[in-house]
Image (cartoon, rainbow, N blue to C red):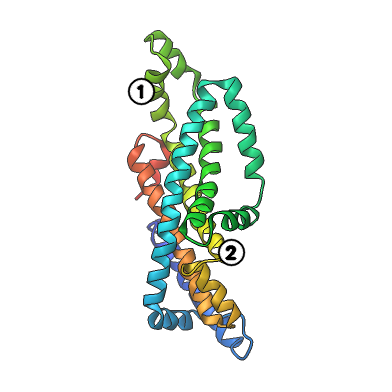
């Protein structure tokens, strides 16, 4: 028996989920209902598409800037940790301690310090993206095949040349894997920061929908945010496979 093409099975799951969700949503419909049928969500998207598009763009812009700042900072610190093990180890452990603090606990003081503008949202998004990249990339460098370092010594390479020519290409898959975590984390961090106080963004729409008991809009924003997060993961997955086509994970793309 021939196996189903790869895109078919997820499509079947999606149709089944849609059908079950629709039936359950209609069965529970009424005043105070907390489960909304997907057809109602689609209708809400049609009527509120401009507000959704505008606020999603604002949140994505905040998350994108935070992701860039957080990722670049993490890569720089990873190189410092790898190059200067004694000094870098202290910074790495301090970063892990900060990572253990919940994002919402960091968002509140940052908002109070930086204000209700985009700066606080970008800062929270940067911190959310920073730690996954730092931890994954540091771990990847520490667990590299020792033959890579041996090759560098045989070729009399200095640290910088060995890092650029041998070690960096070897950890590219791990870097993009960390991006698949850091990207959504930055997006969620931006939304959480918007809860603390903002004029616009998906986080503001969620708060407004909750306060107004607008359950259809609440579900619609959640679905849009989930879809955007999935798109971010897919984007970095494709970019990772293009950047490191030799890696085993690249064979899974179709």
Q: Earlier in the sequence, mark 2 or mark 1?
A: 1
Please give left or right for residue 101 compared with residue 69 in the image: right
Going by the picture, which residue comes out furthest to the bottom?
30
Circle 1 residue: 165
Q: Quadrant of residue 193?
A: bottom right
Between 210 and 173, the one nearer to me in the picture: 210
Compared to residue 128, the image places residue 21 above or below, namely below
Residue at 45% x, 55% y is 63
Compared to residue 231, the image places residue 201 above or below, namely below
Between 32 and 202, the one nearer to me in the picture: 202
Residue at 63% x, 38% y is 96
Disc 1 crowd, CA 10 A, few/some/many (<14, 14-19, 20+)? few
Can residue 13 be seen from the camera position used here?
Answer: no
Helix or strand or loop: what does disc 2 sit on? Answer: loop
Helix or strand or loop: what does disc 1 sit on? Answer: helix
Whole-percent x and y of residue 154?
40, 8
Circle 2 residue: 196
Residue at 36% x, 42% y is 241
Whole-percent x and y of residue 144?
50, 25
Whether tag 2 and tag 1 are in contact, CB under 8 A, the answer is no
Residue at 41% x, 78% y is 45
Compared to residue 114, the image places residue 194 above or below, namely below
Position of the N terminus, as image quadrant, is: bottom left
Can residue 21 be seen from the camera position used here?
Answer: yes
Whole-percent x and y of residue 47?
39, 83
Whole-percent x and y of residue 105?
65, 55
Compared to residue 30, the image places residue 50 above or below, namely above
Please give left or right for residue 242 compared with residue 217 in the image: left
Which marked residue is nearer to the observer: mark 2 or mark 1? Answer: 2
């Amino acid at each position: 028996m021939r196996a189903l093409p790869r895109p078919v099975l997820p499509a079947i799951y999606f149709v089944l989920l849609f059908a079950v969700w629709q039936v359950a949503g209609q069965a529970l419909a009424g005043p105070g209902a907390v489960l909304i049928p997907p057809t109602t969500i689609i209708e809400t998207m049609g009527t509120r598409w401009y507000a959704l598009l505008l606020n999603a763009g604002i949140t994505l812009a905040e998350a994108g800037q935070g992701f860039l700042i957080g990722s670049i900072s993490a890569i720089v610190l990873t190189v410092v940790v790898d190059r200067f093990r004694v000094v870098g180890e202290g910074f790495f452990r301090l970063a892990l301690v900060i990572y253990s603090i919940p994002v919402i606990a960091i968002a509140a003081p940052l908002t109070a310090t930086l204000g209700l503008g985009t700066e606080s949202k970008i800062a929270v998004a940067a911190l959310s993206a920073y730690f996954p990249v730092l931890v994954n990339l540091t771990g990847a460098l520490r667990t590299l095949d020792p033959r890579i370092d041996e090759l560098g010594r045989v070729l009399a390479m200095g640290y910088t040349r060995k890092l650029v020519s041998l070690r960096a290409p070897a950890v590219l898959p791990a870097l993009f894997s960390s991006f698949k975590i850091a990207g959504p984390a930055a997006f969620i961090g931006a939304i959480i920061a918007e809860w603390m106080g903002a004029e616009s963004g998906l986080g503001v729409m969620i708060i407004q929908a909750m306060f107004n008991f607008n359950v259809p809009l609440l579900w619609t924003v959640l679905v849009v945010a989930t879809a955007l997060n999935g798109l971010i993961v897919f984007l970095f997955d494709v970019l990772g496979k293009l950047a490191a086509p030799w890696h085993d994970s690249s064979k899974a793309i179709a």
